[in-house]
Each structure stands twice: as structure tokens, then as C-alpha cells.
Image: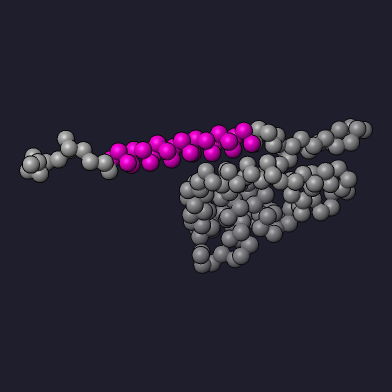
Amino acid sequence: MQIGLKREEKLFCYHFAETGDISLSAEKAGFSHNEAFEKGCEIIAKAPARKLITKQREFISGRTIDDIKVALRRIIFGANNDAVMTIFSDGSGLKSYDLFSVSEIKKVDGKGTEIKLISKTEALKLLYEIEKNGFEKNKAESFISALSSAYCPENEDEDDKI
């Protein structure tokens, strides 16, 4: 890894490469909310940190469609228990809740809390389309590969003909 960076600084770099948010990345790396932005800026100013961020972004951009399928399966088959628990929570411990499939949480004046979840049906439709297109792409690639490796007499050299 990068020499000269502390563990928290490396964590910041990984989170920043993913989110692009200085304060959020610094908080996820363990810095307090009050010092997050300042610490994040200090880390970004270091050449080894910028190098690590660039390297991590290159890795992230190389991810495949499989990551998207994993996220969709998590939405489709995941439980929403933690989302419901936020209604009854006093706010402590929210960081430990799995709110992956929550798209919005808002307090409604005098009426409680409104939670909007990502549609499992829409996620399932999207996953189906991705799987279907991937299957069709694989079929097409296999067909093209078979054609290209097949015997083609018109591609022979004149010297090879009998």
C-alpha cells in the first residue's frame, strides 16, 4: 500500500474514491463530524493520498455488472426491518441499521415519519433485463466465436488448396 499514510488516512482515501464527499469520507474513516472536512482536506493535500485515490478510482471503474446485480439482489431479497426500526428509534444507533433499500426518510410535521423504500418489483424487473441481456450477449458471443473458428474454405491460402 501507500507508505506514509496512517490507517485512517487510507480509509479516507478508499471512501473518498467511492463517494467523492470529503466530510462523509472522513467521518467513515473515523474522524469526528466537527473535524471531518478539515482532516479530509489535509489528507487530500498529501501526494501519496492522491495517488491512492487515483488507484482506487481506477479499480472502481473496472467493476463489472456483477456489482450491480449484487446490489439489486440485496434490494429484492433483503429485509426492511431496520427501516421500520428507524420509526421507533430515538436516533441513537442509526449507523448500525441496514438502510440500503431506503430511498427517503423524512419527518412529517405532527404526523410521524415517512419512509420510502426502493421498489422491489422495479429492482426485480431491472435484474431480469440485465440477466436476459447478458444471456443473449453470451449466446451471441458464443455464436460469433463458433463461426470464427469454423472451417471456411474461402479463407484458405491458394497454396493450401488441393
Compare residues 76 and 63 and report the one nearer the observer: 76
Q: Which residue extends farthest front?
A: 162
Residue at x 79%, y 47% (from the top left corner): 82
Magenta stretch secondary structure, dominant: helix
Q: Quadrant of residue 11 in the image?
A: bottom right
User: Is residue 111 depicted above or below 40 in this figure?
Assistant: above
Image coordinates of residue 79 in percent, x first then y, are 75, 46
Compare residues 71 and 53 and report the one nearer the observer: 71
133 in the magenta segment: yes
81 in the magenta segment: no
Q: Quadrant of the C terminus?
A: top left
Residue at x 57%, y 55% (from the top left corner): 13
**Left or right: 157 as drawn, with respect to 41:** left
Image coordinates of residue 129 in percent, x first then y, are 55, 34
Note whether residue 4 is visible.
yes
| Region rendered in magenta | 124-148
Residue at x 84%, y 52% (from the top left corner): 92
User: Is residue 13 depicted above or below 74 in this figure?
Assistant: below
Image coordinates of residue 22 in percent, x first then y, are 63, 49
**Left or right: 107 as drawn, with respect to 32:** right
User: Is residue 71 depicted above or below 32 in this figure?
Assistant: above
